[in-house]
Amino acid sequence: MTDVDVDAALHAIFQANRLLRDASERISATTGQTHSRRMVLQAAGDRTTVPDIARKLGLQRQSVQRVADELVREGLARYEENPRHRRSPLLVTTAEGQTTLATIHAAHCAWVQKIEAAAGELDWTRLRGDLDRIARVVDGLHQAQG
């Protein structure tokens, strides 16, 4: 394999990521949500703090806080007292939020089935392993650069 092959493969990953994010935005939009709001809402189901969600999703705490506050205002999530940290409440998905997530999940599953059928024979397990390996390498290089 040459540098050109590696570069072309990485560009294909970027292209696939862009298309996957666009599709996720369209799926989330069917319930009036965005991909980011969906991800925060899903993470909130674990009864966790905004800083923990931000770390998990690799986002800035302030942007997650803004989204969390919007979800709370709209009744899709709520804050609960955190017995371990008085100033960092837990974000929890409400019943209405769970219904929204269930609708998004159903649409997502149907979309995944279409991809699987249209893509034909792929070794999805190997693909995931290969992508995980690339992610670890890229993260390792990033960490080494400081």
Image (cartoon, grey):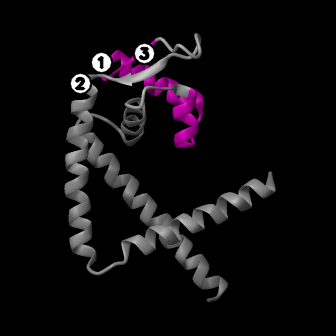
Label 1 with label 2: CB-CB less than 8 Å: yes
Instruction: Give the residue type at disc 2.
Output: Glu
Circle 3 packing at 10 Å, graded few (<14), some (14-19), many (20+), is: some
Residue 31 location, x and y as percent? 23, 36
SS of the residue at dot 1? Answer: loop
Residue visible at 50% across and 64% down in the picture: 14
Residue in front for this viewpoint, 129 or 13: 129
Residue 37 location, x and y as percent? 39, 34
Which stretch is magenta?
A: 51-80
- According to the picture, the residue beneath numbered tag 1 turns out to be 75
SS of the residue at dot 3? Answer: strand
Residue visible at 42% across and 15% down in the picture: 79
**Numbered label attached to residue 91:** none
- According to the picture, the residue beneath numbered tag 2 turns out to be 96
Q: Please tell me in which quadrant of the rendered image residue 18 appears.
A: bottom left
Residue in front for this viewpoint, 26 or 77: 77
66 is within the stretch colored magenta:
yes
Residue 55 appears in the picture as rendered:
yes
